[in-house]
């Protein structure tokens, strides 16, 4: 199974301006993610997909493989789709450019989900820390008994009506797609639930495309704010 990892990276960001080029121990954030993903021996290639000439120049200076993609893309998934039309693979992994704590073990777990050729889209979850359960920035997921996602939400799902303390799972921002799933995604309009939650994976579910979820013990921290960045810097320093 040939797998290519794509790291969508745009310079425009609202909560943390120019975050892809913010430095962690002297390395731009996008480069920290690139090197972390490249540490997996299971990937044929790792590609940064951007619409920023400034990011492209930084990639050239450091020897990170990168492709210029259309500035018209509205999501990272659309950017991965463009790469899928230029680079052949069995599976395309989408690692968001603000996930510097990604581990090779997570990529291995994600590819394990995709070993079933009937799975069109895969992703990961990890047991949610207590602080993440009410946090709308930490997306939660519930699945059926076969691991197929039933719903993703910023709310605490399932709702604990009777105080039974259900298990909560946090969704991690790594995806794996087969080419037909990517081809279909870009033809679909933004869905109602996607607009409500601001979660693009709900477009798949609303249109009947199954997402299967693997479990990993390894949590991650997405960098959306200055506080997130400082938290990641401290975690990597301790590692």
Image (cartoon, rainbow, N blue to C red):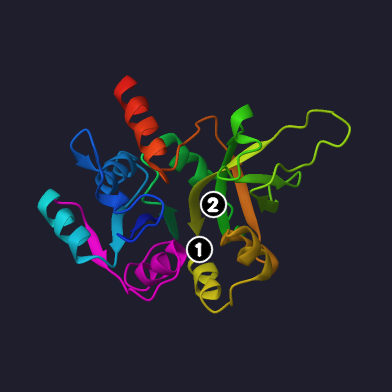
Q: Which numbered marker is on residue 149?
A: none
Image x and y of residue 125, in percent:
58, 41
Q: Residue at x 33, y 20 (%)?
A: 238
Q: Which residues are magenta?
A: 63-90
Q: Residue at x 18, y 37 (%)?
A: 26
Alpha carbon distance from label 2 to label 1 = 9 Å
Q: Is residue 232 above or below residue 172?
A: above
* Residue wearing tag 2: 114
**SS of the residue at dot 1?**
loop
Mark found first going from the N terminus, 2 or 1? 2
Q: Are marks 2 and 1 in contact (CB under 8 Å)?
A: yes
In the image, 8 versus 115, the foreground residue is 8
Image x and y of residue 92, in percent:
43, 59
Does any portion of residue 52 appear in the rendered image?
Answer: yes
Q: Quadrant of the N terminus?
A: bottom left
Residue occupying the far right of the picture: 162
* Residue wearing tag 1: 178
Image x and y of residue 121, in percent:
56, 58
Does any portion of residue 129 appear in the rendered image?
Answer: no
Q: Is residue 126 above or below residue 180?
A: above
Q: Residue at x 77, y 32 (%)?
A: 166
Image x and y of residue 22, in percent:
26, 45
Q: Quadrant of the C terminus?
A: top left
């Amino acid at each position: 199974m040939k797998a290519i990892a794509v790291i969508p990276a745009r310079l425009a960001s609202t909560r943390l301006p120019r975050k892809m080029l913010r430095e962690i121990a002297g390395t731009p954030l996008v480069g920290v993610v690139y090197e972390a993903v490249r540490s997996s021996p299971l990937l044929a290639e790792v590609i940064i997909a951007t619409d920023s000439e400034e990011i492209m120049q930084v990639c050239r200076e450091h020897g990170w493989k990168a492709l210029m993609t259309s500035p018209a893309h509205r999501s990272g998934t659309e950017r991965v789709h463009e790469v899928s039309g230029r680079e052949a693979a069995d599976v395309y992994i989408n690692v968001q450019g603000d996930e510097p704590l990604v581990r090779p073990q997570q990529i291995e777990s994600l590819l394990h989900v995709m070993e079933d050729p009937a799975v069109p889209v895969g992703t990961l979850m990890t047991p949610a820390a207590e602080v993440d359960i009410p946090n709308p920035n930490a997306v939660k997921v519930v699945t059926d008994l076969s691991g197929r996602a039933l719903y993703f939400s910023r709310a605490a799902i399932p709702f604990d009506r009777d105080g039974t303390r259900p298990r909560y799972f946090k969704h991690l921002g790594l995806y794996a797609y087969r080419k037909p799933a990517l081809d279909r995604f870009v033809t679909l309009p933004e869905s109602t639930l996607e607009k409500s939650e601001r979660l693009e994976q709900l477009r798949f579910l609303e249109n009947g495309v199954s997402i299967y979820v693997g479990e990993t013990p390894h949590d991650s921290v997405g960098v959306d704010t200055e506080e997130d960045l400082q938290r990641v810097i401290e975690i990597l320093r301790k590692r």
